[in-house]
């Protein structure tokens, strides 16, 4: 039966895979997917500690993180669509100029 260390290992692996994807990619969609992967790694560690300590507060934090991630995804998708309409690209390197 997997213990706390197994869940925390998978959680850290998810987080660092998301971090590597966020740092190495230039596509905005891939960056947001990597951010969601990092949030899921954090959620897994919350749930693991919550089950290990027999406390429900970790589950409550996970619900808040999921709600924030859903709001972030909706807002970021709208911003990416607007940026694509204005610049015709979703490459992060092209968004470095702030023109009015």
Image (spheres, grey):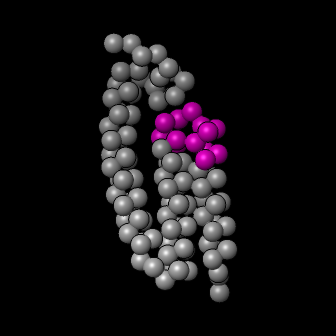
Give the quadrant of the N terminus.
bottom right
Per the image, is 23 magenta?
yes
Residue 41 in percent (x, y) is at 55, 60
Residue 85 sits in quarter: top left
x 34%, y 57%: residue: 67
Q: Residue at x 53, y 80 (%)?
A: 53
Q: How many marks?
A: 0
Q: Residue furthest top?
A: 100
Residue stretch in magenta: 19-31
Whether 39 is drawn above or below 99: the answer is below
Q: Residue at x 60, y 64 (%)?
A: 11
Residue closest to the eye, 92 or 11: 11
Q: Position of residue 12 (x, y in %)?
A: 64, 60
Residue 61: horizontal and vertical position, in percent?
41, 65
Q: Nearest the camera: 88 or 49?
A: 49
Dominant secondary-structure state across the stretch colored magenta: helix
């Amino acid at each position: 039966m997997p213990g706390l260390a197994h869940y925390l290992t998978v959680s850290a692996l998810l987080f660092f895979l998301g971090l590597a994807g966020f740092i190495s990619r230039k596509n905005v969609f891939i960056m947001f997917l990597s951010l969601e992967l990092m949030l899921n790694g954090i959620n897994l560690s919350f749930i693991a500690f919550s089950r290990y300590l027999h406390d429900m507060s970790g589950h409550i934090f996970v619900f808040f993180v999921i709600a924030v991630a859903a709001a972030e995804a909706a807002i970021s998708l709208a911003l990416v669509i607007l940026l694509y309409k204005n610049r015709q690209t979703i490459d992060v390197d092209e968004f470095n100029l702030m023109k009015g």
